[in-house]
Image: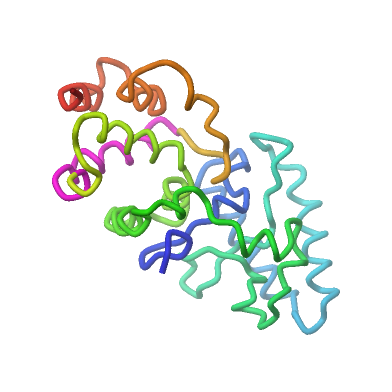
């Protein structure tokens, strides 16, 4: 398993899921609509049905509000398991048997199959995967965290700057780490994709302040105080 398809959930951030400017419950409806239409109308042995599916949903979803008009949201992202808890590429080679099947998508097979997000490339990606799974997140929440490499970088930098190893962070600061991650949802903060550029990485400020700013914390927040007591 991996951050993309973990034991507990799966991530679709690189497919532009969060570029659609709507609530998670609406994102789930969009994923369900794609999945149902795909299963009822697409026969991969008839390639024209794949093309017609893409044309249909690109036209339909072009009218949806987006956070960034330059970012593509792939309509081939849908539910890939019957229980509709796991999302993924509906034209992935594992499903089609064709190693080039993702050439029907906007990015094409070479990009879809070689791209690894920055969180997946971390040396401790398995630790983050296991931690995310322990939170019992739904598919949208999981994607929101697994694809947010900027937040994870801010967290790691803060703990390291506080003299705490990342292994010790996972082992001895489980509750605080959980609060940090789940706090993101209380403010509605969302990454747009998993390949966003960290525009503030070189800006002045302590690691504590950068994490605080990323979470939009204020001094009156309980989490702010917990982090402040931990910093060196």
Q: Residue at x 69, y 68 (%)?
A: 37
- Which residue is at a point 53% across and 63% down the rendered structure image? 87
Quadrant in the picture for the N terminus? bottom left
Colouring method of the image: rainbow
Q: Residue at left 48%, top 23%?
A: 202
Q: Give above or below for 7 relative to 232.
A: below
The verdict on residue 177 being magenta is yes
230 with respect to 46 (left or right) = left
Label count reads: 0
- The residue sitting at 57% across, 38% down in the picture is 196
Give the percent coordinates (x, y) of residue 11. Answer: 49, 57
Furthest residue in direction right, as rendered: 48
- Image height of 33 relative to 1, above or below: above
What is the x, y in percent for residue 78?
Answer: 60, 63
- Magenta segment: 169-188
Q: Nearer the viewer, residue 125 or 96?
A: 125
Q: Quadrant of the C terminus?
A: top left
x and y percentages locating residue 194 in the rendered image: 54, 46
Is 87 or 177 nearer to us in this picture?
Answer: 177
Residue 56 among those drawn in magenta: no
Where is residue 131 drawn, in percent x and y?
29, 54
Horizontal side, residue 35 vs residue 213: left or right: right
Based on the displayed image, in which of its 4 quarters is residue 77 positioned? bottom right
Magenta segment's dominant SS is: helix
């Amino acid at each position: 398993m991996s951050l993309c398809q973990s034991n507990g959930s799966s991530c679709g951030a690189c497919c532009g899921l969060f570029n659609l400017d709507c609530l998670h419950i609406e994102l789930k409806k969009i994923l369900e609509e794609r999945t149902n239409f795909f299963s009822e109308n697409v026969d991969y042995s008839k390639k024209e049905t794949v093309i017609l599916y893409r044309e249909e949903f690109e036209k339909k979803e072009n009218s949806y509000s987006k956070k960034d008009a330059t970012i593509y949201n792939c309509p081939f992202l849908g539910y890939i398991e019957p229980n509709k808890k796991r999302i993924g590429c509906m034209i992935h080679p594992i499903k089609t048997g064709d190693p080039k099947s993702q050439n029907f998508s906007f990015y094409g097979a070479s990009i879809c199959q070689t791209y690894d997000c920055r969180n997946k490339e971390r040396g401790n990606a398995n630790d983050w995967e296991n931690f995310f799974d322990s939170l019992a997140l739904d598919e949208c929440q999981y994607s929101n965290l697994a694809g947010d490499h900027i937040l994870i970088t801010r967290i790691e930098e803060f703990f390291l700057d506080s003299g705490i190893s990342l292994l010790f962070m996972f082992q001895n600061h489980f509750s605080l780490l959980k609060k940090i991650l789940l706090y993101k949802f209380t403010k509605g903060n969302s990454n747009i994709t998993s390949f966003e550029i960290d525009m503030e990485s070189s800006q002045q400020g302590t690691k504590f302040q950068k994490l605080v700013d990323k979470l939009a914390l204020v001094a009156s927040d309980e989490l702010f105080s917990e982090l402040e007591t931990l910093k060196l």
